[in-house]
Amino acid sequence: MTLLPLKEYKKKRDFGVTPEPEPVPGEGGGRAFVIQKHQASRLHYDLRLEAHGVLKSWAVTKEPPLEPGVKRLAVQVEDHPYDYIDFEGEIPAGQYGAGTVEIWDSGTYRPLLEGEPDKTVAEAIERGALKFSLAGERLKGKYVLYHFDKKGRNWFFFRMKG
């Protein structure tokens, strides 16, 4: 596995200062997710889905939706290494993302790739829509990430009915 997807992650951090994990090859093939409450310059929640050995990541502007009908802005950020799945701690002042990170929810997810069983999670993200089912402590049920800003990094994150 190549670490090329983590190039941006590595470029933004000084691992001699921050306690964040350094990029190493991930497990791959799993379906773990984590949502980290991140009190940085602004409070937000980082949604991370394991896919292809990395954590695909979005910064969600408000608390993730527990009920259908509530949409949240989710800004896609750089992939994170798999070891970030259980990261909690204080990112020091002066470092990218400085502030407190704590796990808000975690568990597993299942992609819902109806009619396209050969499509991968990365391909669904590339196409701009990923449906998935979450099995966490707080978040349970079917969710969607929908890319509405084709030239940018902006997505909607919401819970589906049913």
Image (cartoon, rainbow, N blue to C red):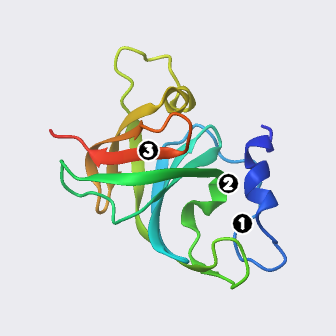
Q: Amino acid at mark 3?
A: Trp
Residue ID at (55%, 26%): 123
Report the quarter where the N terminus lies.
top right
Sequence-first disc among 1 and 2: 1
Q: How crowded is the residue under tag 3: few (<14 C-alpha within 10 Å), some, or many (20+)? A: many
Q: Amino acid at mark 1?
A: Pro
How much space separates mark 1 and mark 3, taking CA atoms? 26 Å
Sequence-first disc among 1 and 3: 1
Q: Residue 124 placed where, x, y %?
A: 49, 28
**Residue behind mark 3:** 155
Image quadrant assignment for residue 15:
bottom right
How much space separates mark 2 and mark 3, taking CA atoms? 21 Å
Image quadrant assignment for residue 139:
bottom left
Tag in front: 1 or 3: 3
- 17 relative to 114, above or below: below
The numbered dot on residue 81 is: 2
Residue ID at (31%, 62%): 137
Q: How crowded is the residue under tag 2: few (<14 C-alpha within 10 Å), some, or many (20+)? A: many
Provide the secondary structure element on which disc 1 rests: loop
Q: Residue 102 placed where, x, y %?
A: 49, 75
- 158 relative to 2, above or below: below
Residue ID at (62%, 62%): 84
**Residue behind mark 1:** 21
Q: How crowded is the residue under tag 1: few (<14 C-alpha within 10 Å), some, or many (20+)? A: some
The numbered dot on residue 38 is: none
Evaluate if marks 1 and 2 touch, with contact meaning CB atoms under 8 Å apart: yes
Q: Amino acid at mark 2?
A: Pro
Report the quarter where the C terminus lies.
top left
Direction left: furthest residue: 162
Q: Would residue 65 appear left or right of 51 to someone viewing this image?
A: left
